[in-house]
Image (tube, coloured by chain):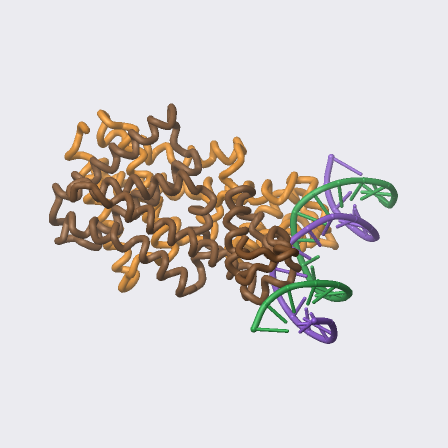
Chain colours: A orange, B brown, C green, D purple
Amino acid sequence: MSTSEPGGYHHGDLRRALVEAGLRLLTEGGADSLGLREVARAVGVSASAPYRHFENRQALLAAVAREGFLRFAAALDAAGRDVPDAQRLEAMGAAYVGFSRENPQLFRLMFSPEVSKDANSELMSAASTAYRSLAALAGAENPEAEREATVATWALVHGLSVLLLDDQVRLNDEADRDRLVARILSRFVAGLRALPNG
Amino acid sequence: MSTSEPGGYHHGDLRRALVEAGLRLLTEGGADSLGLREVARAVGVSASAPYRHFENRQALLAAVAREGFLRFAAALDAAGRDVPDAQRLEAMGAAYVGFSRENPQLFRLMFSPEVSKDANSELMSAASTAYRSLAALAGAENPEAEREATVATWALVHGLSVLLLDDQVRLNDEADRDRLVARILSRFVAGLRALPNG
DNA sequence: ACCTGAACACCGTTCAAGT
DNA sequence: ACCTGAACACCGTTCAAGT
């Protein structure tokens, strides 16, 4: 991909190549396709080569999930740009649910217990970057109950994402889903504003 | 357990014994401990014996998850009994989050993609039983937007469960968690009542 | 009808060895 | 410093065979 070696494989940064192969395998074949041997095979390297770059399979999953959180944060930020202040929280909420819809396998991996369990600090910081702006907005809607507002907003959009991903809500079509999400978000935000103190 | 056989193992209902061993292994060692060989070993039977009762590993996981949904439904129902109508939705919401806290591994399995993906009809019906009363209550709070109210309520409690399970909310102590959940629920239900039409 | 035992392909992981 | 190759223990699954 980078230079013009005859063999063509081991392109300088094997770690990066493995993570990218992981992202590809994940979206194609689901989460179990994301094995150390499989990812090594996809890159054209021996089965034990990944161990130079990842301590074990969990570390590979965490690296792929981290990439997911970076994209997630970028998507949330982009959704908040060029939007009037009053509608920003709704826009980002919709983007949260939208990301889960467009990257179902990646989203699932990001919140999978196999990955979120341990205290991988790189992962945690990537994840918290993704949430920060959403949390700031939610808190600003209701400063007197900042933590409640933040947690509730986050829980709502996360729960919506999961329920919709698992097809646990009966929907007529794509437009129906978007309408449902938009309405729930706008009611919820209105509720945040209307109930300043508990 | 049942009769007084000398060997003591193959007690009539191997299937049931395997599911119970699965529940035990799950709460002890997490979701990966729930393997066909491991569960067979726990019951004292050959590695291939489970295949008389489960088509594959997924089917075992689904059977354990189904048991989880039965208990879940019972817990939600119990929480709604002997509670004034006006507080029932909040009580059941708290029970939803409480169940996830008390049965973290089981809760995770129940909503794991490994299990919820396929169209296992037995599982689906057990799951929908669990939700029915919660959905009915949420819809009743706001009949003009029944579906929105139902989905939003469900998303909120489910999202809360997941976030708290993964320790993604900073909490001072146990009481702090209960207070946070209670406040969020009471605000949310108040919002449902206050915003009848979108 | 239900279970055992041996076998197969596969995986994560380790380790000595190569360049 | 980074990768290969062989090896180990383990798993899900299959199948012939036993009672």
> x, y (%) of residue A139?
27, 30
Q: Name the residue located 70 percent from the left edge and 40 percent from the top edge.
A: A52
Q: How many marks?
A: 0
Whether residue A89 is visible here, answered yes or no, is yes
Q: Name the residue located 65 percent from the left edge and 56 percent from the top edge.
A: B7
> x, y (%) of residue B44?
64, 54
Write down the quadrant of residue A32 in the picture: bottom right
Q: Quick one: B184 or C4, which is closer to the camera?
A: C4
> x, y (%) of residue A152?
29, 37
Q: Quick one: B133 or A42, which is closer to the camera?
A: B133
Whether residue A98 is visible here, answered yes or no, is no
Classify residue A8 as left or right of residue A191: right
From this view, report whether residue A69 is shown above or below residue B42: above
Q: Name the residue located 48 percent from the left edge and 33 percent from the top edge.
A: A124
From this view, report whether residue A76 is shown above or below residue B149: above
Q: Quick one: C6 or D5, which is closer to the camera?
A: C6
Q: Name the residue located 62 percent from the left edge and 47 percent from the top edge.
A: A18
Which quarter of the rendering shows the C terminus of chain A?
top left
Classify residue B35 as left or right of residue A167: right
> x, y (%) of residue A169?
30, 57
Classify residue A71 as left or right of residue B3: left
